[in-house]
Amino acid sequence: MALKSILKKTADTVETETKTETESPSPRDKRNLEIALYHANLIQAQKDVEKEILIALETLIDFPADPSSSSSEPSSADVESFKNLIQPFQPSDYDELFEERRIADKCGYVFCSNPPKQSGRGGKFKFLGGKRLQDFRVVEKQKTECWCSPECAHRALYVRVQLDEEPAWLRRGGGVAPIQLLTERDEEDKRGSIPIDQEALRNHLEKLKVERGEQGRMMPKGIITDTVVERVASTSTPVAAPTQNNDFPGTAGGIEGYAPRGVTIGSRVKTAEELGDVELDLI
């Protein structure tokens, strides 16, 4: 019997091991591989978007690129560049832009080159509100000192409300609604491209005031007014007073509207004349 070496592998053994390694993986292994690749691609997409946002922040800090433009009428080149850079932003990323521009001593609105307006007083918080008590609120002082004027704050926040809350690497469909500036919206309204029924708008605002408990011209049904109207008495025929029954003097004319003619004693009915002065307990 020929001896076999235990140190060297034969050609048949090597061929068998090669076939085992090249066999197709099981369905479970395929599924695990797909999940791992999906998460790896998602993490890579997140890194790419965060890098894109960081570059956009560095660029927008130095805006406006055209020094001759103003916050009310920015240059078309700056507007186009801003809309492209702002696409992957979330509202939190836009808030970071406000803070970075404030630190750089610039207005939070990217198309304004003026320094922000600061009160210079101590304290971390600030009171804001109008004439009514429910309008008062407490906000962080830094959030109110990012802009040079209320107009710039209004324009900047108008852009913020249009940003998507969902992260850019999770957005599906690819299509993103274009960002619209407040000045562009005003120009469209002036050209009449967006017709508005002013009377219907006023009525709608009045209804909203009533729903919030404010004073308005319109009063919905079901609300009690404070107008007191005296009720006029009707002229109907007065009800006649009840007459006393002569058959039973002193009994107030009967029992619940019924006047008995006699009283049963035993098997015989006796009238009032026969009873005489006998007192009857009718209760």
Image (cartoon, rainbow, N blue to C red):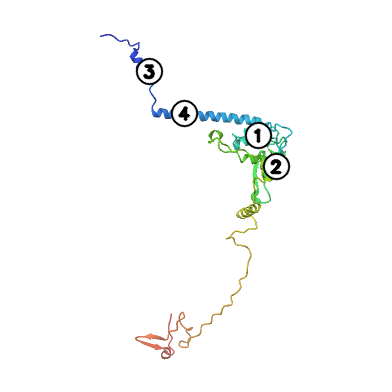
Q: How far is disc 1 from disc 4 in space, using C-alphas?
A: 38 Å
Residue 86 vs residue 277, the one in the foreground = 86
Quarter of the figure with residue 61: top right
Q: Are marks 2 and 1 in contact (CB under 8 Å)?
A: no
Instruction: Name the residue type under label 3.
Output: Thr
Earlier along the polypeptide chain: callout 1 or callout 4? 4
Residue 34 vs residue 172, the one in the foreground = 172
Residue 2 vs residue 269, the one in the foreground = 2
Residue 202 vs residue 151, the one in the foreground = 202
Q: What residue did someone put label 1 on?
A: 80
Viewport quadrant of the N terminus: top left
Earlier along the polypeptide chain: callout 3 or callout 2? 3
Discs 2/1, front: 1
Earlier along the polypeptide chain: callout 2 or callout 4? 4
Q: How far is disc 3 from disc 1 in space, using C-alphas?
A: 59 Å
- Residue 151: image location, x then y, percent: 70, 42
Extreme-right residue of the structure: 68
Instruction: Name the residue type under label 2.
Output: Glu
Q: What residue did someone put label 2 on?
A: 151
Discs 3/2, front: 3
